[in-house]
Amino acid sequence: MNIYEADILKKLYKEPFINQRVLAESAGFSIGVVNKSLRQLAQEGYLNSDMQLTEKARQEIRDKAPRNAIILAAGFGMRMVPINLSAPKALLEVNGEPLIERTIRQLHEAGITDITVVAGFMKDNFEYLMDEYGVDLVINRDYASRNNLHSLALAAKRIRNTYIIPCDIWCAANPYSSVELYSWYMVSDREDEDSPVRVSRKRELVKAGDKAGNEMIGIAYLTRPEADILRARLSEMDKDPANDDEFWEKALYGKDRMILQAKTVSATGFVEINTYEQLRSLDSDSDYLKSDAIEAICKALDCRADEIRDISALKKGTTNYSFLFSVRGAKYIMRIPSEDTKQLINHSQEAEVIRAISGKGLCDDPVFIDPETGYKITAYIDNARTCDPEKISDLRHCMAKLRKFHSMQIKVEHTFDIYEQIEFYESLWNGYPSVYRDYKKTKENLFSMRPYIEGMEKDWCLTHIDAVPDNFLFYNSPGATDELLQLIDWEYSGMQDPHVDIAMFCIYSLYNRQQCDQLIDIYFDGACDCPTRIKIYLYIATCGLLWSNWCEYKRRLGVEFGEYSLRQYRYAKDYYRAAKELM
């Protein structure tokens, strides 16, 4: 049977047949479609002469009836800043009811009690669901580095007459049923320029191309054979690292369409809660709208919470989460340190640095910084860009900015000791050995050069430490003919040899030796002596080991840096040898 016939059979299962007109109004089809479908259903033996279901029809319904559901709830929910720091978005409450509990309750109402929840971020918060609702938990330990294709792959063996449900959907009416007769994917009747699919006249989900698509809601139902196809595809796709960032829906696509039919619903009955403001629009009294970050903004900018608008997440950094927002028409960025960052960075020292550089033209002074929490608010700069490490003119401007900063000889009370930091990051491995088999020898080589470096004459002043291309911000100012330049993100800064900043720029840019020498020559205007070049090579090596150790720590938290991590360790070895050659 086709999907029109299936929908009509489902209607007849739930409601007795009166006449074609009543059935057409109830099903939302034309009388012509209803008449044609009834004739076909009778001809195939699903309906008798009285338009009642036959045993064959009832067996079909039993065979395709929903057996279980999988709720995908592992993600961090980046766009939910700032409230994603206190709870997984699946547990956000709307009108006093957690999203995931509402979904589970609606499934129970449809007779579906075999429910699997795939958790990851704050996974322990979901444990109560096992006792309260009898759900099974599957843990995605790679939630920070892999998207929900991996989450569903972990539960793929359970896909059989199954609802697949995102955790962040609030459904006004219950979308689940004890009767399903075909596989479908739910979209709304609202156009979405970013949606990759649209509903065709045959109720297929075809690739949208350059046309507007239908908003994807994300709920799906799969029977065989589509469930069999999905399981096989998930198994294969999950093995390929290229799919780490993919949504599970990628496994549904054939050449130019999904393998599932479209189930189109009214957009007004379904709300995907992806942002703070979506939650606020749905339930302005939700306790989850309250957060330390929102309170800090209100205090710093002397505003009410409802004046904080246009909240949107920025790309997650290596140590922080940031979001853009506006208050009374002015735009700001708020930085919130990630949980593990609190043991890596001393924000009281960062506040000391901010005070020391304030008013010196190095960067815009923060609107607010809290030495305890590390929360920081800065004014947003429109049309800004970061340094292009392959562009010589950018490098000249950035190195000139560094020289000017270093020449100020600013002093603070604390030091950034590279060797102590190497030991500190190593201590965070909790006794586990390095992934590199020759780590011990590499570390010994670099530490053996410590007396050489410390014995050299050098300036000793405030050094940025994280003077990498992404932290040089070019922007235009009204009335200015040339681009202006700021050096931002001073959280690692401390007293050190300022030439460490050159080394840091090199290793973050993944420069080869020729490019490193070029940057050194730009900084020194071609007048770098051999001992200084040797020293910078050793800084490149030592800082490479420093960030390699940091990457090893983050890897144990589930964050993978790929080539960057390996290249940092290579810097430790290659530039130790390069320095020895010059010596």
Image (cartoon, helix red, strand yellow):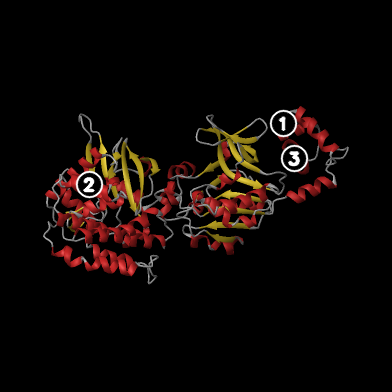
Q: Position of residue 45 (x, y in %)?
A: 85, 41
- Gap between marks 1 and 3, in whole Å? 12 Å
Q: Secondary structure at mark 3?
A: helix
Report the residue marked by disc 2: 519
Residue 489 appears in the picture as rendered: no
Residue density around tag 2, few if under 14, some if 14–19, many if 20 or more, within 10 Å: many
Drawn side of residue 98 relative to residue 515, left or right = right
Dot 2 or dot 3, earlier in sequence:
3
Residue carrying label 3: 6
Mark 1 vs mark 2, foreground winner is: 2
* Type of amino acid under label 3: Ala
Depth check: give the residue in front, 239 or 449. Answer: 449
CA separation, marks 2 and 3?
69 Å
Q: Answer left or right for 43 relative to 440.
A: right
**Residue 566, image quadrant:** bottom left
Q: Nearer the viewer, mark 2 or mark 3?
A: 2
Circle 1: is it few (<14), some (14-19), or many (20+) Cα within 10 Å? some
**How many tags in the picture?**
3
